[in-house]
Amino acid sequence: VQLVESGGGLVQAGGSLTLSCAASGFSFDDLAILWFRQAPGKEREGVSCISDSDGSLYYTDSVKGRFTISSDNAKKTVYLRVNSLKPEDTAVYYCAAALLAADPYCTRWPTDFNYGADYWGKGTLVTVPS
């Protein structure tokens, strides 16, 4: 399993980015794709989840209405569109994957699976100056 993020950068507050996660070595039917972020000096937090297998989605409260996760199965790529960026969105954003252990998966990811992940990318930095 390989996950490679791209699309990070420096964006002014209020701006947008699309982060990409190129996946290989597995089927989207077998794994949920996750996005985490880790801000400077803070713990890593689970941001979003998508399961192509069962159609479930998840967003953490702080990004609801601003972030949109989507997938392109043909390209084996998952996207995280991040809009209305705020300085507090500054973080390294990580793509990860988790074995599907429930149906639906993403709605249970925070509670039943404690934001777990089985595979990780190396991250892409998003900086929103204040």
Image (spheres, grey):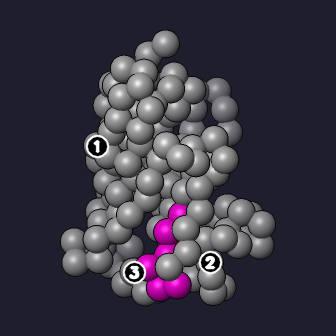
- List x then y, in percent, for residue 112: 77, 73
Element type at mark 1: loop
The quadrant where residue 52 appears: bottom left
Left or right of residue 3, residue 39 in this image: right
Instruction: Name the residue beneath numbered marker 3.
Output: 28
Tag 2 residue:
105
Question: Is 50 inside the magenta-drawn segment?
Answer: yes
- Find residue 129 and report its image quarter: top left
Q: In the figure, 12 relative to 4: above or below? A: above
Near mark 3 (Cα within 10 A), the count class, few <14, some 14-19 or many ≥20, is: many
Residues under labels 1 and 3: Cα distance? 21 Å
**Span shown in magenta:** 49-54
Q: Which residue is mark 1?
A: 7
Q: Is residue 10 above or below residue 18?
A: above
Give whichever of discs 2 and 1 has the lower sequence position.
1
The answer for how far apart the CA atoms under marks 2 and 1 are is 26 Å
Secondary structure mainly formed by the magenta segment: loop
The residue that appears at 22% across and 78% down in the rendered structure is 74
- Amino acid, disc 3: Phe
Q: Is residue 89 left or right of residue 46?
A: left
Evaluate if marks 1 and 3 touch, with contact meaning CB atoms under 8 Å apart. no
Tell which circle, 1 or 3, labels the residue nearer the N-terminal end. Answer: 1
Q: Residue furthest right?
A: 111
Can you say whether 65 is above or below 9 in the image?
Answer: below
Q: Position of residue 18 (x, y in %)?
A: 32, 46
x 41%, y 38%: residue? 83
Q: Position of residue 59 (x, y in %)?
A: 59, 55
